[in-house]
Image (cartoon, grey):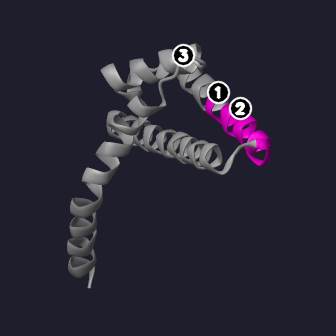
Amino acid sequence: MENRITKLEAAIELKVNPLWQVVISEIPKLLISPHTPVLDGYVRKGIKSGWKSLEDAEFTHLEELIDQEIVAISLCLSSLSQKDRGIAKGRITALALMKAGAGIDRGIKKEIDQC
């Protein structure tokens, strides 16, 4: 039974890994905006050198900036046109995916470093 589970985990990882690579490396590129220079600085550093290259304080600040932007966008959704609402929801989704992907990438690498 354990062997079967291990094979299943390996198969799932093989299928999911390319998606996570896109989340970690490509989606952040879409989020760079002239309106968010501090967030963009962290994103560029994460893209260029890997999310692990951010200091813990920088990564915490990045997470806070993402959360603040998600809240700000959410608060004005109702005042946007249908088209702009779709764009805003897409940005919220991309921000959340980037935050999750970067956190997973950092967490996995930290665990490996501690071994």
Residue 65 — which label? Answer: 1
Question: Does residue 13 appear anywhere in the picture?
Answer: yes
Please tell me which residue is depicted at 26% across the width and 85% down the height of the picture.
1
Q: Marks 2/1: CA distance?
A: 5 Å
What kind of secondary structure does the magenta stretch mostly adopt? Answer: helix
Q: Quadrant of residue 111?
A: top left
Q: Marks 3/1: CA distance?
A: 15 Å
Q: Nearer the viewer, residue 97 or 49?
A: 97
The residue singled out by tag 2 in the image is: 68
Does the magenta segment cover residue 16? no
Side (left or right) of 53 relative to 72 = left
Q: Which residues are magenta?
A: 65-79
Q: Marks 2/3: CA distance?
A: 16 Å
Give the class, few, some or many, for how many residues have Cα within 10 Å of label 1's Cα (few <14, many ≥20): some
Please tell me which residue is depicted at 40% across the width and 27% down the height of the picture.
52
Q: Are marks 2 and 1 in contact (CB under 8 Å)?
A: yes
Spot occupied by residue 91 in the image (x, y as percentages of width and height): 55, 41
Please tell me which residue is depicted at 21% across the width and 69% down the height of the picture.
11
The relative height of residue 111 versus residue 86 in the rendered view (above or below) is above
Q: Nearer the viewer, residue 43 or 111?
A: 43
The residue singled out by tag 3 in the image is: 34
